[in-house]
Image (cartoon, grey):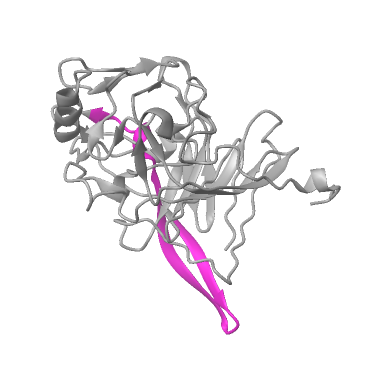
């Protein structure tokens, strides 16, 4: 099918068997219960499956990553504000991590007005910066849901191909548009972790080969231990979230690369210490994932028309 992205947009595809994600950096998964203060209405998106006998159109939908969502205690009090956890609801201890994961909710999303995500037919538009001032939103990592809207769409690509179109005309040098597969659980970890009652329908369970520490919730717990703010809206915690990653398309209007990153673990895995392969500790090449990967850049191979 043809997926179109405009402005400073990114698509990311998830991989286990294989799931699909769509986004614009920065990177940021969050609260685990389903909130009732704001409704969730997934943007509808069509795709086609084709054989030698022709193509059939399938109705899918898009969900934004849980890390971008409002997380609150069920009565409107924020569990996380700006770049900090609520110290009463989510103390920076193991007990606090468990309590926060049990008691904080994930709210529904206003896709276009808050996150700059709009879908029409088979076209999806992702905004990079939406709004302005202190209320601006940056990034819009999103995933493709199957017809049930409770599971990620899984792609079985062996001996098959998929195609998409991306409008990179306003994606300048210095920004990274990305479409990639990562080895997330089909249900977003809902069946594996008892505190995760939101699942794929609310964009939970993200991981990649960089083992990101900015994931607010993982494995049904809040990542509050050792939380350190890194920007106005994000921070990093003790744990990272690792899994195999296949970057199909990382690009802008100037450059492009395709890069596989393998890991020694299977599926979404919470890491700590050396296993995370953190740069700050000097363990980049000692972790469970190949963070550099093996990239293929057509221009570097003297193919300047691709």
Q: Main secondary structure of the magenta part?
A: strand
Q: From the viewer's perspective, is residue 77 above or below residue 175?
A: above
Is 82 in front, or is 274? 274
Q: From the viewer's perspective, is residue 265 above or below residue 56?
A: above
What residue appears at the point 14 percent right and 25 percent down from the top-left corner?
95
- In this rendering, the count of numbered labels is 0
Asked whether the viewer can see residue 212, the reply is no
Is 264 in front, or is 148? 264
27 with respect to 301 (left or right): left
Residue 172, quarter of picture: top right
Where in the figure is residue 197, as x and y percent of width and height? Answer: 19, 45
Where in the figure is residue 64, as x and y percent of width and height? Answer: 39, 42
Residue 186, quarter of picture: bottom left
What residue appears at the point 32 percent right and 57 percent down from the top-left corner?
151
Magenta-drawn segment: 45-71
Where in the figure is residue 40, as x and y percent of width and height? Answer: 29, 44
Residue 202 inside the magenta-drawn segment: no
194 with respect to 146 (left or right): left
Where in the figure is residue 45, as x and y percent of width and height? Answer: 46, 57
What residue appears at the point 23 percent right and 34 percent down from the top-left corner?
221
Rendered-image quadrant of the N terminus: bottom right
Is 30 in front, or is 209? 209
Residue 54 inside the magenta-drawn segment: yes
Is 221 in front, or is 37? 221
Q: From the viewer's perspective, is residue 54 above or below residue 236?
A: below
241 with respect to 302 (left or right): left
Asked whether the viewer can see residue 218, the reply is yes
Residue 59, quarter of picture: bottom left
Q: Given the current orientation, which residue lies at the most extreme bottom position?
A: 53
């Amino acid at each position: 099918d043809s997926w179109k992205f405009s402005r400073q947009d990114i698509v990311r595809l998830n991989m286990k068997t294989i799931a699909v994600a769509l986004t614009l950096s920065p990177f940021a998964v969050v609260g685990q219960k389903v909130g009732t203060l704001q409704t969730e209405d997934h943007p509808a998106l069509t795709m086609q499956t084709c054989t030698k006998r022709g193509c059939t159109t399938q109705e899918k939908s898009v969900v934004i990553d849980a890390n971008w969502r409002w997380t609150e205690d069920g009565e409107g009090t924020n569990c996380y504000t700006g770049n900090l956890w609520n110290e009463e609801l989510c103390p920076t201890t193991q007990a606090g991590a468990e309590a926060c994961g049990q008691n904080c909710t994930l709210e529904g999303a206003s896709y276009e007005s808050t996150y700059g995500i709009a879908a029409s037919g088979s076209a999806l538009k992702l905004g990079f910066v939406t709004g302005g001032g202190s209320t601006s939103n940056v990034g819009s990592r999103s995933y493709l849901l199957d017809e049930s809207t409770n599971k990620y769409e899984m792609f079985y690509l062996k001996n098959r191909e998929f195609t998409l179109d991306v409008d990179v005309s306003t994606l300048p040098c210095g920004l990274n548009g990305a479409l990639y597969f990562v080895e997330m659980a089909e249900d977003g970890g809902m069946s594996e972790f008892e505190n995760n009652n939101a699942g794929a329908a609310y964009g939970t369970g993200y991981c990649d080969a960089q083992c990101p520490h900015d994931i607010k919730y993982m494995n049904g717990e809040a990542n509050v231990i050792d939380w350190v703010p890194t920007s106005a809206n994000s921070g990093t915690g003790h744990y990272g979230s690792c899994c195999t990653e296949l970057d199909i398309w990382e690009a802008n209007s100037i450059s492009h690369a395709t890069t596989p990153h393998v890991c020694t673990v299977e599926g979404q895995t919470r890491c700590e210490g050396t296993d995370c392969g953190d740069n700050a500790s000097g363990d980049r090449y000692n972790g469970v994932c190949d963070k550099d990967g093996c990239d293929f850049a057509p221009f570097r191979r003297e193919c300047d028309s691709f």
